[in-house]
Each structure stands twice: as C-alpha cells, then as structure tokens.
Amino acid sequence: MSSPNPYAIDADTLSGMKPLRKVVYSIGSNLGDRLTILQGAVDAIKDTPDVIVVDVSSVYETEPLGGPDDSNKFLNLVIVAESTLEPRTLLERALAIEDAYGREREERWAPRTLDVDLVIVGNTVKDEDYLKLPHPLAHERGFVLVPWLEVDPAGEVPGQGKISDLIKTADLSGVVRRDDLAITE
C-alpha cells in the first residue's frame, strides 16, 4: 500500500539511525594559560566525530566556588552542539579532553587546568554513579546560565525549566563578560 504522502519516509530506512540531540558543555579553567586551554578544549570538541558545534559563547570570568581562598578566577564559556553520540561517549570524550590538559582530580573544588562539564544531552535524564544528566548544579550556576542564555535563549534544563527563568534566581555576582578575550571558531 502506498503512502498518501509522496514525501513520507519509509520507517524501515530509519532502522539503526540515532537521534540528533542538543548537547551543552560548560568549560572552565583557572590554572595555566586559561584562554589557550579553553581554545584547545573548544577545538577538541569541534574535532570530535559526530559532534557538530552550533555556537560558542563569549568568555566570562568568574570567582571559583569552594576550594582555597587564593584560587585564581575562572574563565568560562558554554558550547552548544548537536550529536548522535550516546551520553556516556560524550562524557568519556569530555574526560579525555580534561586529561589531555593535565586535569587532576585529587581534591574536590581544587583549582584545575580544565573542567569540561556535560550539562545536557537532549532531554536525557540519568542519575548514575558515572553520569548525572542534566548536570545536577547547572540550573543554579551563573557561570553556566549566563553564557548559555547568550547563545541559546530558548534553552532549557530538563526537569528544571527555561534558562531565561532559571537565571532570574541564580547567583550572578562575579560573572563578568570578558569582551577583550575571544575564542576563535
């Protein structure tokens, strides 16, 4: 039986295809040449097969949360991408990029060369030891919400709400856009 829609896609041709989902990364650095490290992380994500970078936010400087009082300020940005990769694969790639820049995980909240957080993967909700999606604190963090709103005004954190609403109650103190610093796309 033929379809009344001549442009209909045969469901059998879709078998094995994976959905293209929005992926949001929050990236930060407060050790070393912070801007060069951020640039390297953006480039590494762009070089990841099956990840298409849609937009990269401006660079923001923020105060570190937790950790020693004498820690350097962070440079942060957000990447919005699309991918067919599974969340675990995206997380493993993020961790590999951190490792490539000498990230050490000896102490929580310690200064770090690079932090690549996987914030969302589509509407996926996971609460496993190795992966929590959406990122459990992203909806509260100004250094995630401000750059994310810049590049994705309609963005949402699954189960938490729209970025434009969440930002109204987040602590935005110390989140400063650095127009003198730029990432090359």
Image (cartoon, helix red, strand yellow):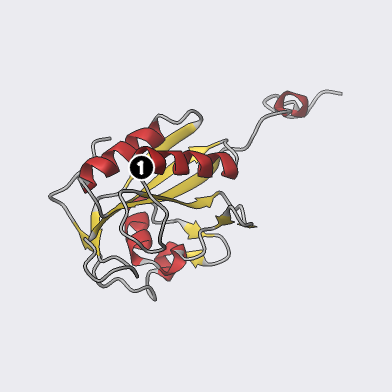
Q: Residues within 10 Å of mark 1 (few under 14, many from 20)?
A: some
Query: Where 59 sits versus 172, above or below?
Result: above
Quadrant in the rendering for residue 65: bottom left
Residue 176 in the image: x percent, y percent? 21, 62
> Residue pushed farthest left?
180
Residue at 38% x, 66% y: name it. Answer: 141
Query: Where 168 sits versus 157, above or below?
Result: below
**Callout 1 secondary element:** strand
Residue 133 in the image: x percent, y percent? 56, 56
Residue 78 in the image: x percent, y percent? 36, 50
Q: Is residue 94 left or right of residue 37?
A: right
Query: Where 41 sits versus 61, above or below?
Result: above
**Closer to the camera in the image, 93 or 157:** 93
**Closer to the camera in the image, 16 or 3:** 16
Residue at 25% x, 52% y: name it. Answer: 31
The amino acid on which the numbered mark 1 sits, given as a three-letter code, is Asp
